[in-house]
Image (spheres, grey):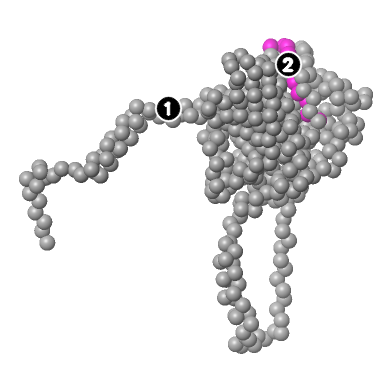
Amino acid sequence: MAVAIHLSSLRTWRPGPAATLLGGLALALIAGLLALGPARLWAQIEGDRGIVPVASTSDIQINDVEVNTTGSNAQEARSKGWQEAARLAWKKAGGPSMDDGSIQSMVSAVVIQREQIGPRRYIATLGVVFDRARAGQYLGGTNGGRAHSAPLLVIPVLYSGGVAQVFEVKGPWQKAWAEFRAGNSPIDYVRPVGAGGDSLLVTAGQPGRRSRAWWRNVLSQYGARDVIVPEARLERQWPGGPVRGTFTARYGPDNTFLGSFTLTANDEAGLPKMLSEAVVRLDQLYGQALEEGQLKPDTSLNMQAQMDPGLAALIAAGQAPQQAAPSAAPTAEASATPTPTAAPVETRTFTVQFASPDAGAVDAALGAVRSAPGVKGASTTSLAMGGTSVMRVTYEGDIDTLAAALRGRGWRVTVGANALSIKR
């Protein structure tokens, strides 16, 4: 059937209110995209906004070790500087007199705080991390068998001047959490660096989400089992005057309230000290909640798909009559050999030490470890560009199985006490 359209009818057509509104919105969207351009979108993740957290393992870390060494070239001078730093850090920690080889065998990482490298000279301020399993017998200071939490993602939300922020800029609250030495804490903190996509994935609005699917995607990026949200609200009485801070400990995808307290700094110069004290007190609140059984991982955040309980009950009810009915035809054998059921594999967390001469080496090591079979998550806990970095790996199995999986990917693996060292 042919349809005839007269041009005169088109000339007399006028858009209605709905069409006019939709057309206006479309034009506004196109104009906005042309005005912003891709540069604005890229500006949301570019820039120097990340703060690398200190090592969060239970190892013994000695910071602010100053060295000044020389050598025939820059590499030799740096190597001598790191050896001297280990020796000075061991003495600073109160360890007994030992040879350099024994001390070096207990070093798990070197944290570069500041360094200057010349053609034949190396001046630096370093942090030395000793493996607690090896050095603890000489230095003491164990955790006394305290229970530890599952890996918990930290989202430090700061409210200041009516604005909420997390990683959009280098804020003082993020800095306080990054500098917190959590080695002796019962909480296994997973602290994002805040650079790159962290500022888009973890925002101040994230704690208000209730979607478990969204939370599972976020937690899987960082190898965490649940989330904690330490909030800080800063109120300045007048410019240059006292700063009043209200700090709240929250937990879980439902933003559950755990506790709150208030601190005051005399002026802006005292703000960093107040925030550092607040982090310590919040850590105590979370530790107390762990002892009281309030920090159990939310079962709805399990990475594996879960069946609705009502649906499971209906399926079980439908299978019950079939199981009760007699078999239509007897089988030749009286009973079949039972199929052995595989025992559940325990998920554990290990520390992996790797060389990180540049950012590409860090990405390559993380990618290789994450692709190993059985690995549920891997994230860096201590970055030392040009030195040795540390990552936390969540793995289904024991440490020997993980070592074998990494060897299959071309790594040279050294197995230690709940830790691995990998090299190419």
The location of residue 331, given as percent across then percent down, is 65, 85
Q: Quadrant of residue 188?
A: top right
- Residue reaching furthest bottom? 329
The circle drawn on residue 124 is: 2
Residue 19 lies left or right of residue 323; in this view the side is left
* Residue name at image x 51 percent, y 26 percent: 46
Label 1 neighbourhood size at 10 Å, few (<14), some (14-19), many (20+)?
few
In magenta, the rendered stretch is 118-130
Q: Quadrant of residue 369?
A: top right
The circle drawn on residue 40 is: 1
> In this view of the protein, which residue sits in the foreground, 286 or 261?
261
Label 2 neighbourhood size at 10 Å, few (<14), some (14-19), many (20+)?
many
Q: CA distance from mark 2 to mark 1?
A: 38 Å
Residue 38 lies left or right of residue 329; in this view the side is left
Contact between labelled residues 1 and 2, with CB atoms less than 8 Å apart: no
Provide the major secondary structure of the magenta segment: strand
* Residue name at image x 78 percent, y 45 percent: 291
Instruction: Report the amino acid beneath label 1.
Output: Arg
Q: Is residue 73 magenta?
A: no
> In this view of the protein, which residue sits in the foreground, 66 or 149?
149
Instruction: Report the amino acid beneath label 2.
Output: Ala
If the image is split into quadrants, where does the N terminus sit? Answer: bottom left
The location of residue 236, given as percent across then percent down, is 60, 21
* Residue name at image x 27 percent, y 37 percent: 24
Is residue 322 something one can see in this rendering?
A: yes
